[in-house]
Image (cartoon, helix red, strand yellow):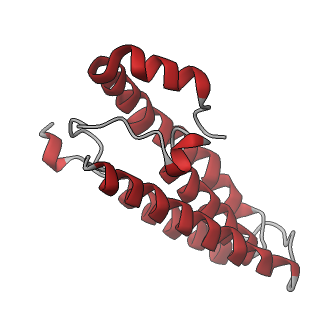
């Protein structure tokens, strides 16, 4: 498949949001969080969004691409990348968990592990292979020092 025609992570995120909404409204299973406790989800959603934006900004400052499947020109290890090798994906997961809390029902949470597995297989593993090939031992050292998620 042409690299420019591949589905990007934001599409997976939007599909996950739509799936969570559909499960909440059409198959709510059980209410597990009632207001005002469910409002804590907004904090997680905002935290996730800030983490995504911070990660994107770090790529921009380093002058490298944020798009998967494009060759990176710099190994980004500053900003949120000091604590997580994948802060953008982590931010997307936090945002999904936040939405699940806001909905307050159990069924939307089924989507989160599916999203994590898809992101891991379709993006993180191929990206790590490219980073290893491109940056060699520098990426190896970084990989040993910083965890994949947290």
Give the tally of numbered discs: 0
Tell me if 73 is positioned left or right of 51 in this view: left
The quarter of the rendered structure image containing the N terminus is: top left
The correct choice, above or below, for 22 with respect to 111 in the image is below
Res 101 quadrant in image: bottom right
- Residue at the far top: name it: 137
Residue sitting nearer the eye, 83 or 125: 83
Q: Which residue is drawn at the image coordinates 56% and 57% (left, top)?
A: 91
Inspect this view and state whether residue 27 appears. no
Q: Which residue is drawn at the image coordinates 25% and 38% (left, top)?
A: 69
Tell me if 67 is positioned left or right of 31 in this view: left
Tell me if 119 is positioned left or right of 31 in this view: left
* Image coords of residue 95 (percent x, y): 60, 65
* Image coords of residue 64 (percent x, y): 26, 46
Tell me if 30 is positioned left or right of 107 in this view: right
The correct choice, above or below, for 36 with respect to 103 in the image is below
* Image coords of residue 13 (percent x, y): 46, 60
Q: Which residue is drawn at the image coordinates 39% and 36% (left, top)?
A: 122
The quarter of the rendered structure image containing the C terminus is: top right
Residue sitting nearer the eye, 27 or 45: 45
Q: Which residue is drawn at the image coordinates 68% and 62% (left, top)?
A: 97
Inspect this view and state whether residue 24 appears. yes
The correct choice, above or below, for 6 with respect to 30 in the image is above
Residue sitting nearer the eye, 139 or 103: 139
The correct choice, above or below, for 74 with respect to 139 in the image is below
């Amino acid at each position: 498949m042409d690299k420019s025609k591949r589905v990007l992570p934001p599409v997976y995120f939007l599909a996950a949001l739509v799936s969570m909404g559909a499960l909440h409204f059409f198959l709510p299973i059980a209410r597990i969080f009632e207001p005002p406790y469910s409002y804590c989800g907004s904090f997680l959603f905002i935290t996730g969004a800030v983490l995504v934006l911070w990660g994107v900004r770090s790529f921009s400052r380093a002058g490298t691409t944020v798009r998967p499947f494009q060759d990176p020109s710099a190994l980004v290890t500053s900003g949120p990348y000091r604590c997580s090798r994948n802060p953008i994906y982590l931010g997307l997961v936090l945002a999904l968990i936040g939405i699940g809390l806001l909905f307050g029902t159990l069924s939307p949470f089924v989507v989160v592990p599916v999203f994590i597995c898809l992101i891991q297989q379709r993006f993180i593993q191929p990206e790590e292979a490219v980073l290893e090939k491109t940056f060699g031992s520098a990426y190896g050292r970084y990989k040993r020092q910083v965890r994949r998620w947290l």
